């Protein structure tokens, strides 16, 4: 090699100490390893915190959904219980009405053959004649009632204690339904038919 202009010739270069070089590399590697471990630990803490926050958020969402479903189920069950109680109340009232009208029918049958029956038949015949409003024929029906037919046969009226009892029963059933479910005519307020 030729010497550089204006410079000194090649002189002896100082060679680094291999042990010092290895020590510096080891120190640098140890510092890098410590920095990488600290970065990894910080990254792990951050990831763990984010995961815990996401888990907490999802848990809160799930709990809110479960509470919503439970509240809905509770309302449904309460509604069913109220409807069941209302239905049982209606069934009890209907059973009481059935018993009352059965007893009334038996009493009508018992009295029909006696003097009260004859008085009732005469009153029923008078009412039937008045309803026709003109001369008519009156016959006793098999159920102990009265049938009045106008002379020309175009008008007829049947009047019986059993018929009145049936109409009273229907009116009583309508009243029970009205009181239980509100004004007549709404959905579910139709009175049951007489049996």
Image (cartoon, grey):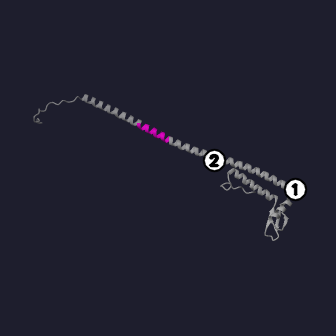
Q: Position of residue 4 (x, y in %)?
A: 11, 36
Foreground disc of the pair 2, 1: 1
Instruction: Examine the image and state in which quarter residue 17 appears.
Output: top left
- Identified at 72% across, 50% down, the residue is 91
- SS category of the residue bearing label 2: helix
Residue placed at 75% from the left, 50% from the top? 95
Left or right side of 49 for 130: right
In the shown orientation, is residue 30 left or right of residue 171? left
Q: What residue sits right under mark 2 in the picture? A: 79
The vertical placement of 147 against 174, above or below, is below
Q: Nearer the viewer, residue 176 or 70?
A: 176
Residue 93 visible, this angle:
yes
Left or right position of 100 against 37:
right
Distance from Cα at disc 2 to Cα at disc 1: 51 Å
- Quadrant, the N terminus: top left
Image-based side of 23 in relation to 187, left or right: left
**Local crowd size for mark 1, using a 10 Å CA cut-off: few (<14), some (14–19), many (≥20):** few
Name the residue rendered at 85%, 65% in the picture.
Answer: 139
Q: Residue 48 lies in magenta, yes or no?
A: yes
- According to the image, label 1 marks what residue? 116
The residue lying at 63 percent from left, 47 percent from top is: 79
Helix, strand or loop for the magenta stretch, by majority: helix
Crowding at dot 2, Cα within 10 Å, few <14 / some 14-19 / many 20+, comes out as few
Residue at the extreme right of the image, as rendered:
115
**Residue 167: image location, x then y, percent:** 77, 57
Residue 193 highlighted magenta (yes or no): no
Residue 114 appears in the figure: no
Label 1: state its secondary structure.
helix
User: 121 or 103, which lies in front?
Assistant: 121
Quarter of the figure that contains the C terminus: bottom right
Residue range corresponding to the magenta coloring: 46-59
């Amino acid at each position: 090699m030729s010497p550089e202009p204006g410079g000194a010739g090649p002189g002896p270069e100082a060679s680094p100490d291999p042990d010092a070089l290895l020590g510096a590399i080891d120190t640098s590697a140890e510092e890098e390893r410590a920095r990488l471990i600290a970065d990894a630990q910080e990254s792990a803490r951050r990831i763990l915190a984010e995961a815990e926050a996401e888990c907490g958020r999802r848990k809160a969402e799930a709990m809110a959904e479960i509470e919503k479903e439970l509240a809905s189920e509770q309302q449904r069950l309460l509604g069913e219980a109220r409807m069941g109680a209302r239905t049982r109340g209606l069934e009890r009232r209907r059973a009481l009405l059935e018993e009352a009208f059965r007893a009334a029918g038996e009493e009508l049958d018992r009295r029909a053959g006696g003097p009260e029956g004859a008085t009732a038949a005469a009153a029923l015949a008078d009412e039937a004649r008045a309803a026709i409003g003109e001369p008519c024929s009156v016959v006793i029906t098999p159920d102990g009632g009265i049938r009045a037919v106008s002379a020309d046969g175009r008008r007829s009226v049947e009047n019986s204690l059993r018929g009145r009892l049936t109409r009273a029963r229907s009116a009583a059933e309508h009243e029970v339904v009205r009181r239980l479910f509100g004004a007549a005519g709404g959905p579910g307020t139709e009175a049951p038919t007489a049996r």
